[in-house]
Amino acid sequence: MPLSAAAAIAATTVLVAAGPAAPGTTADVAPHSEAAPAPAPASAPAPASAPAPRADLSHHGHVTLWGDRIAIRIRSENRGPSDVTASTVRLRFSVPLAASQELPHGCLRGGKATVLCETGGLRSAGGARQTALDLTPAGSPDEVVVRLDTVWSGGARDTDRTNDVHEVLAPATGDAYAF
């Protein structure tokens, strides 16, 4: 699910509470049969829902800090067993980013020091998706800590979070620090 669609769904979700219908609506019309069906007892168990599909999302790559630039390369993949229709990666930085940033398609700001990027669909044991970001921090820090994690997995359940949650320290050496 694209970020814009996920944000729109979250913003428009409405909960409907059960209660008596307003007078004049069809809910207060008497049924045509002699006896109305009895309501289900309150203690009846809820019907079982289908279990969420399982996936194993993985993000690996590197962070490079030099001067006033932060370069991040992410390789996202799904080790299965189910396909993922879309996923979103969150990058949180220990320093604020410059107010004006040109982000790649599918990425948006989530705050002064946060960027969210969609990875698109990830097939089970399929090819990986690449995300490349070149960002400007506010000022010229001597180091930056980048925290990366999955915040949307297309409704799939990921029981192994060790390969999609990372934290990496990148000193301003121009070297690539892997995660």
Image (cartoon, grey):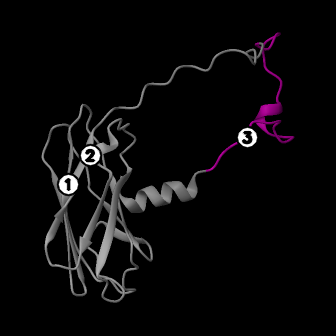
Residue 161, above or below 140: above
Res. 147 mark: none
Disc 3 or 2, which lies upstream in sequence?
3
Q: Are marks 3 and 1 in contact (CB under 8 Å)?
A: no
Point out the stretch of residues depicted in magenta.
14-37
Q: On the image, numbered disc 3 is attached to which residue?
A: 17
Res. 60 mark: 1
SS class, disc 2:
helix
**What type is the residue that disc 3 sits on?**
Ala
**What type is the residue that disc 2 sits on?**
Asn
Q: Assign the magenta stretch its main secondary structure.
A: loop
> Alpha-carbon distance for marks 1 and 2?
8 Å
Q: Position of residue 67 (x, y in %)?
A: 21, 87
Residue 109, above or below 154: below
> Alpha-carbon distance for marks 3 and 2?
40 Å
Q: Mark 3, residues whose alpha carbon is within 10 Å: few (<14), some, or many (≥20)?
A: few
Relative side of 63 to 159, left or right: left
Disc 1 or 2, which lies upstream in sequence?
1
Rendering quarter of residue 73: bottom left
